DNA sequence: ATGAAAGCGCTAACAT
DNA sequence: ATGTTAGCGCTTTCAT
């Protein structure tokens, strides 16, 4: 009862159909050059026996796995409280599925896990990797490089200046931040604060840079470091209010911190947007639409980013398979545009 | 440059260390019965060559993969908007990681994907499967059964009466619902409505049963079907209010729909809990703590459920490996208790 | 168009 | 304690 029924092998199918293993193999993998009648017989045998190819055996010879790893560095609990990850994963999953490619999720909970992930990638389980390199000092990129697995990063890796060799997909964090602040300026706001994300992540750094682009020489007191969480947003908002009572606007580096900021503003009896206008980043629907008031924010298409990451990787893998002309349409990193979504908060 | 450096094989390591492949293999897999000096030499060779075992080759002979699939049936977008999934996944990941077992995520977006998943499971990629989010008519269980892969289900499968053969982990949905309603009764509420979840899921059905346990013979008008989303909660709340203006309490089948209900109540100028008390289910922190007012709800430890699912499966696999005494400590399904968490809404 | 045969890289008896 | 050897199930030349 607990015995796993022994799965039939190619051999068994061949015997049943009265042909050789080679023929069965041909039929199973998009029959080419097999007489229709024979092919039919083989297919019937496959059907009757419930034959499914053993992937380990196949990979051993083809060196392909039709699987890619998604590596999520997650030292903190936060990543999971945040729909961001789920959305991106969803985009990735859709694209991979469409190419009959499996998604292997590797979650790293702490430093100890890195070695395990490195081993896994080097172990030849997957054809490539999709990595969310969250922090500037992350050892993961190094491990991955030494594992020699084709990789696409989600977000600009910290050690890349964006010029070149590393394939990644990102949104225009800097431009989006600039647009957010300019919107506040256009609204006539003059004392604009910024709640940053954790500054060991490039997305947070880039958004801060965008803020500064639009507001060169801004009072340093107007910038407070947050951590992309509602609680961090609350803390930062309080600090901001204490330091600069005359504040008339805030740009929060993501919607989650903006939601925390909104709570503090309400708590302090300040009206949004009349007294203080607020702009977020991400346009995470469940958050941005449910705040009071609904959040004006910078939209990025997260699911699409995931899709694109997968697409880029698959393209790279395809090139590697075929003897590609090295210069021909090599996949390039992508930076997606953002758009400002106006709701009630600014 | 695009060439993947050819990874060294066991053979190469053996040559370098001046021993046989068998010896290297022994050292690589928890050396037993190898002279220390030799083992050291082998380890050095492994190090120098950067040898990593080829898992396909290993699986081919051992028939083990040290990987389990997590199958998430997700016909709707909802699953992803919902931290539930993420939390459970996190628990699973932790447990698997602790046992050096990989997590392979299989997302099914639609009916077409089922065949793919079946093929994958039957293809011998994984040692077992963890399956979620089943709807009553889901074809997945059938496919999985015929793939012959040891499986643990998350939530009571619809086709199981909970008595037996199918291994699963669930929380006490019925008991939790009962406690929620009794709490409202204890508060003196008499016109208690219920916003259900989608009734093709056992969790929703069980919670409805619990509601009825506590309120036998309740007016059918007091029960409205929702879908576990905030929008569904809004719709249901409106219907409830229209049908039963005298309503003084609502038990929503999850926190997300409770949050929708709260919005509608506020919109209609009803005070919570003074006019209408509200209780949710799940205690999804980011939701329950951020509503206005904070939500009284039935807590279930989702991450722990994930952990347990993984543990159960691993145990089953371990038994299968060793020639276990069939009757000895066979893993059994688990139903976890729930607790009522009181906040401001009831 | 089909079959025979040689591995892919590894583990596990079985010898020694 | 170590080496030899025979596969695991499949793809892929190379014959035919």
Image: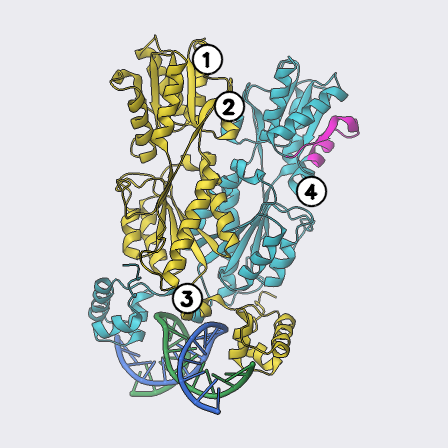
Chain colours: A yellow, B cyan, C green, D blue
Q: Which chain carries label 2?
A: B
Disc 1 crowd rating (10 Å Cα; few below 14, some 14-19, many 20+) is some
Q: Distance between the residues labelled 3 and 1?
A: 59 Å
Q: Which chain carries label 1?
A: A
Instruction: Report the span colored magenta.
Output: B208-227
Q: Distance between the residues labelled 2 and 4?
A: 29 Å
B183 shown above or below B89: above
Instruction: Name the residue tied to disc 1.
Output: A273
Q: Mark 2 vs mark 4: same chain?
A: yes
Q: Mark 3 lies on which chain?
A: B
Find out whether the residues at labels 2 and 4 contact each other: C-beta distance under 8 Å.
no
Disc 3 crowd rating (10 Å Cα; few below 14, some 14-19, many 20+) is many
Disc 4 crowd rating (10 Å Cα; few below 14, some 14-19, many 20+) is some
Instruction: Name the residue tied to disc 3.
Output: B56
The residue shown at (64%, 28%) is B233
A44 shown above or below B341: below
Q: Which of B14 and B192 is in front in this view?
A: B14
Q: Mark 4 lies on which chain?
A: B
Q: What element carries label 1?
A: loop
């Amino acid at each position: 009862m607990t015995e796993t029924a022994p799965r039939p092998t190619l051999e068994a199918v061949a015997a049943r159909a009265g042909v050789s293993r080679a023929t069965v193999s041909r039929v199973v993998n998009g029959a080419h050059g097999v007489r229709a009648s024979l092919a039919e017989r083989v297919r019937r045998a496959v059907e009757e026996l419930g034959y499914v190819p053993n992937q380990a055996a196949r990979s051993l010879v083809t060196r392909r796995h039709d699987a890619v790893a998604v590596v999520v560095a997650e030292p903190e609990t936060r990543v999971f409280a945040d729909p961001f990850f789920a959305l991106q994963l969803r985009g990735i999953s859709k694209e991979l599925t469409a190419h009959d490619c499996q998604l292997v999720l590797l979650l790293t909970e702490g430093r100890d896990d890195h070695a395990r992930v490195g081993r896994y990638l080097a172990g030849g389980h997957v054809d490539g990797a999709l990595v969310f390199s969250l922090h500037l000092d992350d050892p993961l990129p190094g491990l991955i490089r030494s594992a020699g697995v084709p990789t696409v990063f989600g977000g600009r890796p910290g050690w890349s200046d964006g010029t070149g060799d590393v394939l990644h997909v990102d949104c225009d964090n800097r431009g989006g931040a600039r647009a957010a602040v300019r919107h506040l300026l256009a609204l006539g706001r003059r004392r604009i604060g910024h709640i940053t994300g954790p500054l060991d992540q490039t997305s947070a750094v880039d958004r801060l840079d965008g803020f500064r682009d639009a507001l060169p020489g801004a009072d340093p007191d107007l910038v407070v470091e947050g951590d992309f969480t509602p609680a961090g947003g609350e803390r930062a908002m309080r600090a901001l209010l204490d330091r600069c009572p005359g504040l008339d606007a805030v740009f929060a580096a993501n919607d989650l911190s903006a939601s925390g900021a909104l709570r503090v503003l309400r708590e302090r009896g300040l009206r949004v947007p009349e007294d203080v206008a607020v702009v977020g980043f991400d346009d995470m629907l469940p958050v941005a639409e449910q705040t009071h008031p609904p959040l004006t924010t910078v939209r990025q298409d997260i699911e699409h980013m995931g899709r694109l990451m997968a697409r880029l990787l698959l393209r790279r893998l395809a090139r590697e398979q075929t003897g590609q002309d090295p210069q021909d349409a090599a996949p390039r990193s992508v930076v997606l545009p953002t758009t400002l979504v106006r709701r009630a908060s600014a």
